[in-house]
């Protein structure tokens, strides 16, 4: 049986500690969804609840087309908005399927209609990439980062900026 | 010192008038409605048409519906609203009254939109007759 040197053992233990540190790499919870065949995400800390599309939606006249109506969520009335206009995507105001994400940011709480909820994941922060300059101009003010999910590019949106722009009349 | 009993706000009553138009219903505070009469009755009060702000689809739905004339309170006067549909008086607990969600408050296109009313499993729009007059006058 060969002896292993103390130095080697110490080095391997140090590596093991390094590995543990790697496991503790900060993670970010992301809610990934599809809008108009593109993949987007919000940080999980801003999404309070995912509501099925079967929740009855009540149309409210006198609102912009991107404000679909309201839902009665256990006695609390919440607005439901579409982001296609703000993000300049082609889908739109007739959307009634998918899911509703209940988001809260910029002092506003609202439902956000998405075409499909894809996943909720914990992603190492190091996998978030800076936004390229080639990003469509309409998206640039609202994008935090890009990352890859199941081989597809996902755009991480900043919900604070999105809702701030929406309440100022954009979209 | 006398005993003061405070009724929880949600248990207070509110009196409302529902305006049914096609599949839609708008709500007014009953205290803002002075009278309701058939359109043919003559009056010298200013008359505004609700159809000036209702979407085209509603206009089609209510093409053959007889119009009513509601006398409503304005800022400091009374005015009349021509309305194609039915009218209903109800009383509800204040728990059915909901403030507009903040986003709707900021994005509303109708200044007269004031609050939401939960009634028979639906959410209805409460409008303010004083603002409605100004809104209709601007749009007619």
Image (spheres, coloured by chain):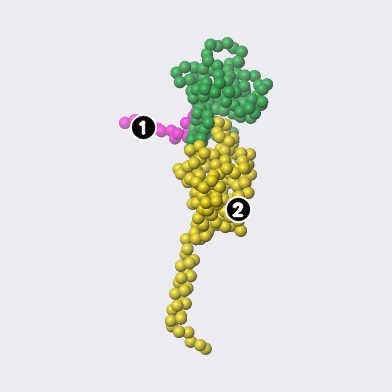
Chain colours: A yellow, B green
- Mark 2, chain letter? A
Percent from the top left, x then y, of residue A79?
54, 39
* Residue A80 in sight: no
Q: Residue at x 52, y 13 (%)?
A: B45
Q: Which stretch did the figure color magenta?
A: B1-15
Magenta region includes residue A116: no
Residue underneath mark 2: A118
- Give above or below for B110 relative to A1: above
- Give above or below for A122 relative to B124: below
Percent from the top left, x then y, of residue A122?
53, 58
Per the rendering, the mark at residue A81 is none
Label 1 secondary element: loop
Circles 1 and 2: CB atoms closer than 8 Å? no
The residues bearing labels 1 and 2 have C-alpha atoms spaced at a distance of 59 Å
Outermost residue toward the front?
A134
Percent from the top left, x then y, of residue A116?
62, 49
Q: Residue at x 50, y 44 (%)?
A: A162
- On-image quarter of the C terminus of chain B: top right
Residue underneath mark 1: B3
Please rate how many residues cluster around mark 1, counting C-alpha atoms within 10 Å: few if below 14, some from 14 to 19, many from 20.
Answer: few
* Residue B27 in sight: yes
Q: Quadrant of residue A153?
A: bottom right
Q: Residue at x 51, y 88 (%)?
A: A2
């Amino acid at each position: 049986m060969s002896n292993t040197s103390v130095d080697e053992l110490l080095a391997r233990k140090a590596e093991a500690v390094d590995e543990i540190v790697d496991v503790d790499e900060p993670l970010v919870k992301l809610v990934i969804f599809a809008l108009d065949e593109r993949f987007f995400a919000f940080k999980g800390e801003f999404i309070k609840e995912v509501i099925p599309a079967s929740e009855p939606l009540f149309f409210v006249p006198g609102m912009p087309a991107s404000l679909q109506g309201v839902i009665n969520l256990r006695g609390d009335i919440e607005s439901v908005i579409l982001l296609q206009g703000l993000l300049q995507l082609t889908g739109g105001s007739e959307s009634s399927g998918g899911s509703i994400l209940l988001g809260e940011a910029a002092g506003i709480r609202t439902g956000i209609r998405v075409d499909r909820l894809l996943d909720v994941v914990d992603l190492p922060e190091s996998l978030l990439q800076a936004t390229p300059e080639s990003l469509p101009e309409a998206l640039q003010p609202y994008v935090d980062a890009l990352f890859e999910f199941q081989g597809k590019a996902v755009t991480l949106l900043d919900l604070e900026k999105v809702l701030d722009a929406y309440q100022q009349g954009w979209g | 010192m006398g005993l003061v009993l405070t009724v929880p706000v949600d248990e207070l009553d509110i009196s409302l008038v529902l305006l049914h138009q096609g599949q839609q219903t708008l709500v007014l505070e009953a205290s803002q409605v002075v009278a309701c009469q058939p359109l043919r009755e003559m009056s010298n009060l200013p008359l505004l048409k609700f159809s000036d702000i209702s979407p085209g689809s509603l206009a089609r739905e209510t093409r053959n519906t007889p119009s009513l004339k509601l006398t409503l309170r304005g800022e400091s006067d009374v005015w009349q609203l021509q309305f194609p549909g039915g009218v209903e008086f109800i009383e509800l607990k204040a728990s059915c009254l909901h403030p507009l969600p903040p986003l709707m408050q900021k994005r509303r296109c109708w200044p007269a939109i004031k609050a939401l009313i939960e009634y028979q499993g639906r959410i209805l729009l409460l409008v303010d007759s004083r603002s409605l007059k100004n809104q209709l006058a601007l749009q007619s």
